[in-house]
Every structure is written in structure tokens, then in C-alpha cells.
Amino acid sequence: MEEGYFKRRLVRPILNLLRQGITPEKIALSVALGAALGVFPALGWSTALCAIAAIVLRLNLPAIQLANYFVYPAQIVLLVPFFRCGEKLFRVPHFPISAPQIYGLFHAGAWIAIRLLWTTIWHAIVVWTVIAPVFVGLVYAILLPLLRSALRHGAVPTAGPT
């Protein structure tokens, strides 16, 4: 039976990290932070932020970047909601822009997009800063028992093709 994309590209690599001796705590925190930083509401920053977090907090770089990679579509989808929440939080007028327009702006020129969207992005980052710690805590609390259970019950794969 063919393994699914999600299992092959996310679950198995994470279980392989357990096999290599990375603790469930480090993997859970790496994945939780990678997912949170991966939806940072400013395009082009998540990979660097994940690398910095991994180095500073001594986390697993492949795990944090793997989570970052998997949430990239969510980053695009969440840009506008983060922008709208920032508008409400700071009580500023609605800035009419869609996710495809934002994406197009950044592909046309990052500095142009940043200049045009600076206040909106800044407001969205404040909203993200409020939400991200709660998200990290929840994801960590969910993943840690699952990873510990996988380690205890022998769900950790042996060496084989990846």
C-alpha cells in the first residue's frame, strides 16, 4: 500500500528524528515553533526566523524547517485574516487587498510591497505575536504525548529508505 504524502513527508521524518535520539520535547517544540513561525505575517521571513530560533534555542533545525515548509500554504491564507485583525486591534481603516494581490506585490518587488504594506504588516505582526505563544503551547501539548507514546510503543521506524 502506498504511503500518503503527509505520512511520507512529515510523519516519517519526525519519527526518524526520534530514532536518531532527538528527545520528544525537542521535536515537539521544534515542530510547534516551526509551524508558528511559518505563518509569520510577513512573506520571506519565516525560514530565517526558524533557523534563528533553532540555533538560539538549540532545537532541531530539520524539524523546525519541515514544519515551516508544511505550513507555507497557511501563511498565504492567513495573511489577510492577520491584516484584518490588525486593523481591528489598532482601529485603522480597512486596507482593501487580497492574498493573491499581496503575493503578487512581493513577487514584483519585496521593498515595494513592504513600503506599501508596512503599517498593515506591522499591525498583523502584533496580532501574530499575541496568538503565536498560545498556538505553540497548544501544538506542543498535543504533540508531546503523541511523540512520547510513539517512542514507548515502538512506532519509531528502524533505518530504511526515506
Image (cartoon, helix red, strand yellow):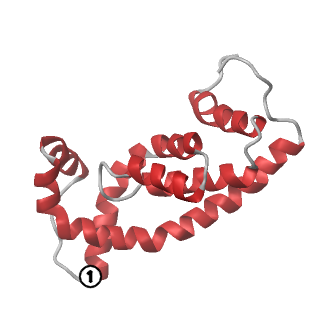
Circle 1 residues within 10 Å: few <14, some 14–19, many ≥20:
few
Please tell me in which quadrant of the rendered image residue 129 appears: bottom left
Q: Quadrant of residue 18?
A: top right
Three-letter code for the amino acid on which mark 1 is drawn: Phe
The image position of residue 120, as x and y in percent, is 22, 68
Residue under label 1: 90
In terms of secondary structure, where does tag 1 sit?
helix
Q: Position of residue 69 (x, y in %)?
A: 46, 40
* Residue 155 place in picture, x, y as percent: 82, 35
Is residue 92 left or right of 51 when viewed as pictured?
left
Name the image quarter holding the N terminus.
top right
Between residue 49 and residue 7, name the one nearer to us: 49
Using residue 160 as the reference point, say whether residue 88 is left or right of it.
left
Quadrant in which the C terminus is drawn: top right
Q: Residue at x 12, y 61 (%)?
A: 115
Q: Quadrant of residue 153?
A: top right
Question: What number of labels is visible?
Answer: 1
x%, y% of residue 98?
A: 21, 54
